[in-house]
Image: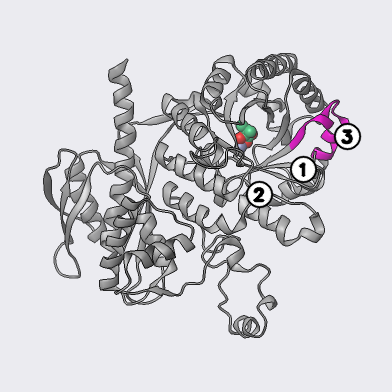
């Protein structure tokens, strides 16, 4: 085992998707999995297959399409391990195996809580029962899959001696990775590092396994705890893009990977991540989930490489290293610069998009080109950031059930804000509706609701300018919750939680961008609802 290599286990599609509002469609999950494979993560936890047939199918698609080299590629090409989560029950383990078995390297990840509070109140199991179940279920998972990960949930608050015993049982039953979760984000770095060191020192058979960290960010310490765990000997880190996840989130991939890279002389450890793909993956996850990245977020926030203070700008001009510990290009942040203009052709657009890492199909390129021409008529300078927003707005959208065909808004200080929308429905017909509201966005959303007839509650609405200047492209991100009690099973809490959907839209007119964002979230919801009702009719 190479002791200088830290495996990056990404759980954006499982623990990340479990966070309120982060629901993604199956197609979006596949795109994110592809982005994770391009990043070079070692393991993709693609979901919790027992949650629903949809979740199982989404994990299966990732296993088939991302867990194997693409057709025509070098058959020896490196592909990530595809992992499915399972509670410690035969049914969950069977479902996880059914979902991941088509991957070249499948993994089953099973878990059971070991803290007194979880065993007493949540599981209602004694220590003996927990030990017996862990032995039985890890052995069962291992009888199906050669790669089995076991997690003692709430390890951060578990009795260390009991933890060593449970982990030893898991190893004997065939676990190959032991993941140590700080489920509630309670520990501090010295403590979490000591916990990992104690496990490595005191658990019989541990030398044949990979020890892993899984930290939550309730005290803002997830990255610090993960790094402390790595220093103590953990060689796998469980992380998510942008740090999304339950409550305050999980450890963020970009923070751990860039800490190990930027402070290499301290850690002397490597990962297989191509860091230049980080910015793009971050943007994709934010667009798909509707979870906005805070501007001052380390590595991927909009201000992470911005230098506002005059004294900083002066230093930067003299020598970049005065205030910059990483080059923005290292994480894939390209300088916003003039790239293309009104007279640029399709080929020039394709070349620039390729340079930015987008390999679009002919059909998607055509769509992007139409939008580009449209934008070039309105905006003189088109930058890389504009192009990226345009591609994600035009290409990475859910299946269109309803599409916006026209929008007219009247607002201001005189009269009531009024919006009229013209939309094409699934029947191919045009529908026109008008509505008044408290403002132009409210009026637009009410008019859209009148057409779609599947009203939703708007949980979050945010708008930001992609580039500077009065003609900037505005990007809107929304999160909605359906009003008809739609819900999904949550693995750890064993309860159904209301499903929320994110959407995004970009346009030089922010009311149009707002309408597109709302429609993209509604379309996602309608696709999910359609899939559910198909299942009901089949039964
Ligand atoms: O936080 C946690 O304990 C988990 C486990 C399922 C690994 O997500
Ligand atoms: Zn977790």
Q: Nearer the viewer, residue 168 or 428?
A: 428
- Marked residue nearer the N-terminal end (3 or 2): 3
The magenta-colored residue range is 195-211
The 10 Å Cα crowd at callout 2, few under 14, some 14 to 19, many 20 or more, is: few
Q: Which mark is residue 201?
A: 3
Q: Which residue is mark 2?
A: 219
Nearer to us: label 3 or label 2: 3
**Residue drawn where x is 51% and y is 37% of the image:** 18
Nearer to us: label 3 or label 1: 3
- Marked residue nearer the N-terminal end (2 or 1): 1
Q: Provide residue 291's location: percent of width, then percent of height.
A: 46, 50
Q: Provide residue 437's location: percent of width, then percent of height.
A: 20, 56
**Residue drawn where x is 54% and y is 62% of the image:** 301
Q: Specify the quadrant that holds the C terminus.
A: top left
**Tag 2 near tag 1, CB within 8 Å:** no
Q: Provide residue 204's location: percent of width, then percent of height.
A: 86, 25
The secondary structure type at the circle numbered 1 is helix
The 10 Å Cα crowd at callout 3, few under 14, some 14 to 19, many 20 or more, is: few
Q: Provide residue 419's location: percent of width, then percent of height.
A: 17, 57
**Tag 3 near tag 2, CB within 8 Å:** no
Q: Which mark is residue 192?
A: 1
- Marked residue nearer the N-terminal end (3 or 1): 1
Q: Is residue 269 left or right of residue 419?
A: right
């Amino acid at each position: 085992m190479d002791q200088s290599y830290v495996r990056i286990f990404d759980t954006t599609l499982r623990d990340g998707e479990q966070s309120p509002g982060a629901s993604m469609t199956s197609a979006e999950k596949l795109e994110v999995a592809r982005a994770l494979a391009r990043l070079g993560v070692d393991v993709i936890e693609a979901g919790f297959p027992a949650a629903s047939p949809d979740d199982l199918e989404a994990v299966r698609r990732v296993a088939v399409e991302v867990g194997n080299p693409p057709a025509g590629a070098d058959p020896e090409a490196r592909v990530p391990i595809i992992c499915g989560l399972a509670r410690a029950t035969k049914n969950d383990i069977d479902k996880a195996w059914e979902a991941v078995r088509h991957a070249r390297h499948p993994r089953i990840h099973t878990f059971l809580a070991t803290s007194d509070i979880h065993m007493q109140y949540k599981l209602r199991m004694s220590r003996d029962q927990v030990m017996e179940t862990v032995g039985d279920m890890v052995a069962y998972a291992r009888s199906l899959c050669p790669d089995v990960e076991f997690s003692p949930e709430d390890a951060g608050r578990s009795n260390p001696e009991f933890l060593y015993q449970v982990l030893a049982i898991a190893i004997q039953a065939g676990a190959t990775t032991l993941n140590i979760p700080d489920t509630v984000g309670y520990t501090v770095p010295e403590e979490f590092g000591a916990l990992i060191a104690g496990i490595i020192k005191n658990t019989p058979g541990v030398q044949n396994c990979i020890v892993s960290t899984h930290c939550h960010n309730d005290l803002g310490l997830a990255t610090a705890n993960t790094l402390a765990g790595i220093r103590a000997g953990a060689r796998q880190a469980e992380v998510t893009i942008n740090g999304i996840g339950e409550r305050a989130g999980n450890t963020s991939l970009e923070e751990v990977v860039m800490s190990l890279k930027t402070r290499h002389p301290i850690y002397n450890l490597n990962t297989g991540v191509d860091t230049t793909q980080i910015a793009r993956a971050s943007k994709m996850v934010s667009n798909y989930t509707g979870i906005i990245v805070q501007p001052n977020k380390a590595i991927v926030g909009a201000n992470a490489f911005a230098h506002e203070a005059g004294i900083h700008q002066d230093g930067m001009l003299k020598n970049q290293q005065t205030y910059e510990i990483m080059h923005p290009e290292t994480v894939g942040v390209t300088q916003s610069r003039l790239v293309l203009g009104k007279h640029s052709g399709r080929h020039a657009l394709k070349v620039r998009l390729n340079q930015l890492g987008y390999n679009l199909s002919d059909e998607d390129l055509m769509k992007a080109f139409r939008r580009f021409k449209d934008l070039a008529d309105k905006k003189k300078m088109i930058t890389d950031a504009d192009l990226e927003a345009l591609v994600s707005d035009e290409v990475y959208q859910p299946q269109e059930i309803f599409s916006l065909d026209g929008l007219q808004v009247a607002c201001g200080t005189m009269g009531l804000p009024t919006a009229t929308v013209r939309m094409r429905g699934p029947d191919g017909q045009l529908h026109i509706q008008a509505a008044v509201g408290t403002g132009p966005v409210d009026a637009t959303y009410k008019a859209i609701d009148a057409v779609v007839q599947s009203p939703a509650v708007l949980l979050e609405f945010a708008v930001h300018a992609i580039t500077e200047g009065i003609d900037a492209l505005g990007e809107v991100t929304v999160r909605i919750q359906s009003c008809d009690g739609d819900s999904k099973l949550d693995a750890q809490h064993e309860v159904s939680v209301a499903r929320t959907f994110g959407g995004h839209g970009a346009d030089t007119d922010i009311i149009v961008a707002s309408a597109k964002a709302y429609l993209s979230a509604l379309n996602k919801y309608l696709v999910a609802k359609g899939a559910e009702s198909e299942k009901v009719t089949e039964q």
